[in-house]
Image: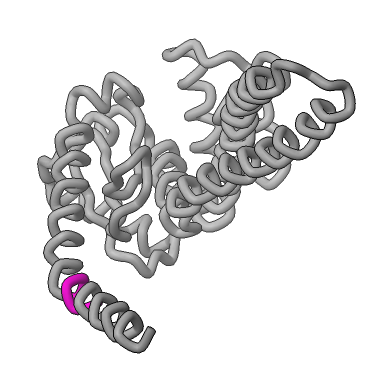
């Protein structure tokens, strides 16, 4: 027994020393890979000093303590989000898990040519609010926790109650029924976690709107942007099915709270 404990101690010590020397290179490699993936999908070209100064001025108004890297959107991102839009995100891997806390802000040059100052302030303030409130950091953790919670719950129900029914009614195909129910419940878990993720996304969009409106006083810009989205992109005034399958509040809801807190 004494020899076994000594071997376990040496093994743990060896793993600890190995992880100490290996952790930093692995972490650095993962960060580098996540950053290269982000630049490939979003863009990494620098913007003019005048544009960076404009964004930095709003960063100060939003009272951001974090250093934000400002980059130019590439064509693919502009196709996804639209020409008159901006995007705040972090380098991430594994379905959105944040690798390191270096916020990036992507914007197009045409954004400043076509939009009014009020519209610019609202959209930039909204995206910077996501960084300020750490919305994007919490999202992957929330998705993982909700999914695991539902899976554990359903696994408990299937194992406990199906086995009881099998013993009580002498079900011959207990294993087949149990595995079938487990697969169905797994699909239900994924669906429910998706709905909770959408609800959380709507919540953080409302919160980002609220922070931008109160800290920059850009109510007129918000109303102009919503009107622009309606005319140019065909965004409907109300979301279907009470918005439960949408990741943003409806235009009508946004107009309502913009007018209410103006």
Outermost residue to the front: 1
Residue nearest the viewer, comparing 28 with 55? 28
For the point 32% across and 60% down, which residue is it?
101
Foreground of the two, 110 or 242 = 242
| Main SS of residues in magenta | helix
170 sits left or right of 202 in the view: right
Residue 165 pos. (x, y %)? 84, 28
User: In the image, residue 252 lies at what x, y percent?
Assistant: 67, 25
Q: In which quarter of the image is residue 240?
A: top right
Where the C terminus falls, by quadrant?
top right
User: Eyeballing the image, is 63 above or below 130?
Assistant: below
Quadrant assignment for the N terminus: bottom left
Which residue sits furthest bottom? Answer: 2
Residue nearest the observer in this picture, 133 or 152 = 152
The residue positioned 75% from the left and 37% from the top of the image is: 157
Which residue range is magenta in the image? 16-20
- Would residue 108 appear left or right of 178 to someone viewing this image? left
From where the camera sits, is residue 252 visible?
Answer: yes
Q: Residue at x 70, y 16 (%)?
A: 173
Q: Is residue 136 above or below residue 231?
A: below
Does the magenta portion include 135? no
Image: 183 above or below 54: above
* Residue 219 visible in the picture: no
Which residue shows up at 49% across the image and 51% down it? 141
Q: Where is residue 144 in the image (x, y as percent from the top left)?
A: 51, 45
């Amino acid at each position: 027994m004494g020899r076994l404990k000594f071997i376990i101690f040496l093994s743990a010590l060896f793993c600890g020393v190995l992880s100490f020397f290996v952790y930093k290179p692995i972490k650095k490699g993962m960060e580098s890979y996540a950053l290269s993936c982000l630049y490939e999908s979003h863009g990494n070209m620098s913007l003019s000093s005048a544009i960076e100064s404009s964004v930095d001025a709003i960063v100060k108004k939003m009272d951001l303590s974090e250093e934000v890297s400002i980059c130019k959107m590439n064509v693919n991102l502009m196709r996804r989000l639209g020409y008159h839009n901006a995007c705040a995100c972090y380098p991430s891997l594994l379905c959105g898990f944040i690798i390191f806390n270096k916020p990036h802000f992507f914007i197009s040059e045409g954004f400043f040519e076509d939009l009014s100052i009020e519209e610019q302030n609202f959209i930039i303030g909204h995206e910077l609010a996501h960084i300020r409130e750490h919305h994007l950091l919490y999202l992957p953790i929330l998705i993982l926790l909700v999914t695991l919670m539902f899976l554990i719950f359903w696994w408990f129900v299937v194992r406990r109650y199906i086995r009881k029914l099998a013993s009580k009614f002498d079900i011959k195909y207990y294993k087949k029924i149990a595995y079938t129910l487990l697969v169905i419940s797994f699909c239900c878990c994924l669906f429910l976690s998706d709905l909770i993720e959408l609800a959380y996304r709507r919540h953080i969009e409302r919160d980002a709107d609220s922070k931008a409106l109160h800290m920059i006083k850009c109510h007129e810009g918000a109303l102009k942007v919503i009107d622009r989205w309606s005319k140019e992109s065909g965004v409907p005034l109300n979301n279907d099915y009470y918005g439960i399958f949408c990741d943003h509040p409806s235009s009508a809801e946004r107009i309502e709270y913009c007018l209410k807190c103006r």
